[in-house]
Image (cartoon, rainbow, N blue to C red):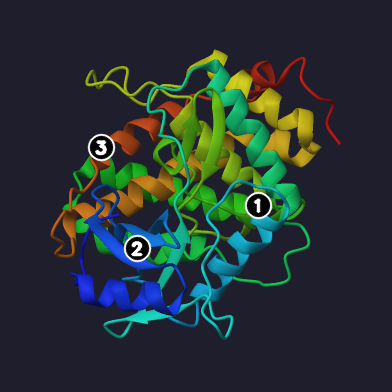
Amino acid sequence: MAVYTEVSSGEAAALLQSLHLGQLTELQGIQGGIENTNYFVTSERDGEVVQSVLTVFERLGFEQLPYYLYLMKHLAAKGIPVPDPASDEKGNILHSVQGKPAAVVNRLVGRSELAPTVAHCEALGELLARMHLAGRDFDRQQPNLRGLSWWNDTVPVVLPYLSPAQSELIRAELAFQNHVAAGASYRALPTGPVHADLFRDNALFDGHRLSGVFDFYFAGHDTWLFDLAVCLNDWCIDHSADEAVDGRHDAERVRALLGAYQRVRPLSAAERELLPAMMRAGALRFWLSRLWDFYLPREAALLKPHDPGHFERVLRHCLLIDADTAAGWLAGEAVAA
């Protein structure tokens, strides 16, 4: 959520007026993340303070964005705590700022928990399963734009920046993921709309309650297991300055997240079989995107690229997760469907 497009107070005020959100009182750029321009927006309407988030989209076009915005509206209508895009008098939820697509959503309460406990992981697992089930009847389709096709296109672009050992690892993992995707077990995985980027900083807690999840702009149609694996690779690992420890999964938090998820939606036999492979897939996806952002950055006023080495270490730890380890994490939880 860096600032690429400098939005003036006048521009923001005019947009708020068109959305019946009152008079602008404060506009503040948000730092963190690297994909879109984001501002916290405060306005006053009929004597009440309204807090919103203005997003100007830097990589997604007008033709792609309705999927994300209407997915949020769909989930919100099902009781999932997600941002709800504001509409103008014609019902439009996708707007324009400086010729770029933009949206304004309500600001969720709470704060991110960057050192999640077992209880936080349980809350996330339950909500993720509810979100997957709530999205089953969403009637729009869009692929995960950072899925396997993107990996195949992007690996050759980042290879010149890698050491021989890194190059060998990323080539081997890409070949493995293509092999997995061609298999019968993968084709049997349940699919639907997924968040695909539900890291700790994309969820909010109000006290001990998980009060919301946001930043759906990597969402797309993919396997639910991939979405689950992305969460396991961020919520349930050690984040440490010690590279020997960084990226290693904590078994207690893994079991907590998986158990809570399965109490709402039990994993199928194919999902249980491919859990280690999809955890590797999640690690590869974010190692690759961080390599891209680190070595081929865009200019931004508040840009701070993430360390690519973190997800390289996550991937190397994922390579050590065998079927027995995964079975141990899943043991005693809900029976496979």
Q: Amino acid at mark 1?
A: Thr
Q: Which mark is residue 223?
A: 1
Which structural element holds mark 1? strand
Whole-number angstrom distance, CA of label 3 to CA of label 2: 17 Å
| Helix, strand or loop under label 3 | helix
The disc, 3 or 2, on the residue closer to the chain's N-terminal end is 2
- Residue displayed at 54% across by 81% down: 92
Q: Alpha carbon of mark 1 to alpha carbon of mark 3: how far?
A: 26 Å
Residue on which disc 3 sits? 309
Q: Quadrant of the C terminus?
A: top right
- To which residue does mark 2 refer? 154
**In the image: residue 268, left or right of residue 162:** right
Instruction: Say left or right for 294 vs 259.
Output: left
Do the residues bearing badges 2 and 1 touch, measured as CB atoms within 8 Å? no
Q: Amino acid at mark 2?
A: Thr
Mark 1 is surrounded, within 10 Å at the Cα level, by few (under 14), some (14 to 19) or many (20 or more) other residues, namely many
Quick check: marks 3 and 2 in contact, CB under 8 Å?
Answer: no
Residue displayed at 53% across by 74% down: 87
Residue at left offset 18%, top offset 48%:
304
Q: Up-down: is 234 above or below 259?
A: below
Identify residue type, mark 3.
Gly
